[in-house]
Image (spheres, rainbow, N blue to C red):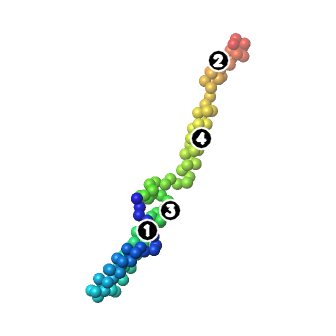
Amino acid sequence: MKPTHSSAPSPDDESLRTSLQNSLAANGEQAGSQALQDRVLAQWQQRHAAPALALAGGFTASQGFRAPRWALPIVLLAISLTLLGWWARPDPALEELMQLDVLSQMALGEM
């Protein structure tokens, strides 16, 4: 199950942030803390923006393989041609009547 992230920070986040800032301020590292926060925020944005970019098409780990749009019409055309060939096959009885010897016997009135 994928966790959801809201844009508004929760009260727990705010209390954690203030406690971290207070502990860093006591050590005199407030400027370093801001740089660290910026890097963490940039990494988080890159990590959570990657799936949105991957939805453009093709293979993604979460979606699996997405077939191109033209794949379905080609498959349907191949099935249609196969069924048409099966349906339009010649009748064996008619093929036998169309033999030259049978036609000649029919012409002479022997059949």
In which quadrant of the rendered view does residue 38 lie? bottom left
| Of pointers 3 and 2, the one earlier in the residue sequence | 3
Residue 94 position within the rendered picture, expressed as x and y whole percent measured from the top left = 65, 23
Q: Residue 78 placed where, x, y %?
A: 56, 43
Instruction: Say which of marks 4 and 3 sits in front.
Output: 3
The quadrant of the picture occupied by the C terminus is: top right
Task: Give me the C-alpha separation between circle 1 and circle 2.
Answer: 84 Å
The quadrant holding residue 20 is bottom left
Residue annotated with mark 1: 5
Label 1 or label 3, whichever lies nearer to me, is: 1
Q: Which residue is mark 4?
A: 80
How many residues crowd around disc 1 within 10 Å: few (fewer than 14), some, or many (20 or more)? few
Count residues near mark 3 (Cα–Cα under 10 Å), then give few for <14, some for 14-19, many for 20+: few
Q: Could you tell me how far apart the alpha carbons at marks 4 and 1 are, in whole angstroms?
A: 48 Å
Q: CA distance from mark 1 to mark 3?
A: 22 Å
Residue 18 vs residue 47, the one in the foreground: 18
Q: CA distance from mark 3 to mark 2?
A: 66 Å
Q: Closer to the camera, 26 or 62?
A: 26
**Quarter residue 22 falls in:** bottom left
- The numbered mark, 4 or 3, whose residue comes first in the sequence reads 3
In the rendered structure, which disc, 1 or 3, sits on the residue that comes first in sequence? 1
Mark toward the viewer: 4 or 1: 1
Above or below — where is 76 with respect to 111? below
Q: What secondary structure is found at the residue carrying circle 3?
A: loop
- Foreground residue, 11 or 46? 11
In the depicted structure, whether residue 53 falls above or below residue 32 = above
Type of residue at label 3? Ala
Q: Which mark is residue 56?
A: 3
User: Is any part of residue 39 visible from this angle?
Assistant: no
